[in-house]
Amino acid sequence: MNLTFPFISTTAAHLGAAVQSNRFIRRCHACTSSNLAWAADKRYSLDPMNAILDAASTWFFESANHALNGSLEVSLVEGIKGSERQFVEVGEDRLGPYFPVTVEPKSRCVLVEFPACKAFFVYDESFDQPDPGLEKKQGRVLFEASSSSFRTFVESRTSLAKLAESPALEFVLCCEDRIIHVLADATPTVHLLSRAPDLQVERTQTWSAS
């Protein structure tokens, strides 16, 4: 699978690779907030797979929580594209100009909830590579998949496929810093949170080519 979007970071090693291959890439960096307090947030439930995710320039990963009851909750904060292009200086290379993408005071915060999660796989987005077995449906940030190498691995290493009454649903969540594959019994729900973003978190420097 290759879910690379037209975003780049200012990490020298990754930008060097981008220059050599003429590809735009994003680098992943753990963005952890110590003040998430999901239980205290007021949630505004949206339609499952709501278009709010695809309407934003991008989403930064903040944290994930897998509860004993099987619910997987992923916290994201909106990245907003700037209005003016800027050149990116990395060593002797001058790239761009690109639009900076940052978390602003008006950035929205959402919680993506996967109920009855049976298995999930989280990895640093910078390590992503094409998955010839991936068959995806509509969606840019969050989409359903009918097959993937992840599903094949789970079914070969567990009894999930044999014991389940019906095949598990598979979803892929793509954001800055992380890609998350999920096998679950139900469709995820997007919750718009009432809290403001934590601007003290040091996030990946991200740029948009268009």
Image (spheres, helix red, strand yellow):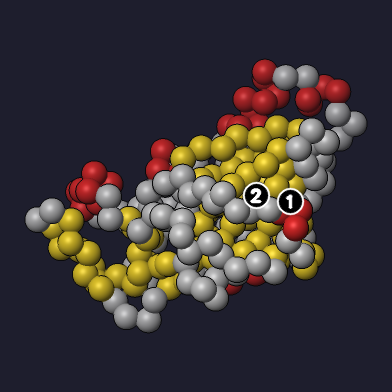
Tell me the kind of residue under disc 1. Answer: Glu
Mark 2 residue element:
strand
Please tell me which residue is depicted at 68% across the width and 53% down the height of the picture.
37
Looking at the picture, how far across and down is residue 197, in whole percent?
56, 65
Looking at the picture, how far across and down is residue 90, in whole percent?
18, 56
Q: Earlier in the sequence, mark 2 or mark 1?
A: 2
Q: Which residue, as the protein is rendered here, is positioned at the far left? A: 92
Looking at the picture, how far across and down is residue 157, in whole percent?
67, 18
Please tell me which residue is depicted at 62% across the width and 64% down the height of the picture.
109
Mark 1 residue element:
strand
Left or right, 175 with respect to 205, comes to right
* Residue on which disc 1 sits: 113
Please tell me which residue is depicted at 46% across the width and 40% down the height of the picture.
124
Tell me the kind of residue under disc 2. Answer: Val
Left or right, 58 with respect to 45, comes to left
Report if the CB atoms under discs 2 and 1 are less than 8 Å apart: yes
Q: Could you say which disc has been placed on residue 160 in the image?
A: none
Q: Quadrant of the C terminus?
A: bottom left
Q: Is residue 137 visible?
A: no
Q: Which residue, as the protein is rendered here, is positioned at the far right? A: 165
Badge 2: residue crowd in 10 Å (few <14, some 14–19, many ≥20): some
Q: Which residue, as the protein is rendered here, is positioned at the far bottom? A: 83
Residue 6, placed above or below residue 29: below
* Residue on which disc 2 sits: 74
Looking at the picture, how far across and down is residue 19, in whole percent?
21, 53
Please tell me which residue is depicted at 34% across the width and 72% down the height of the picture.
99
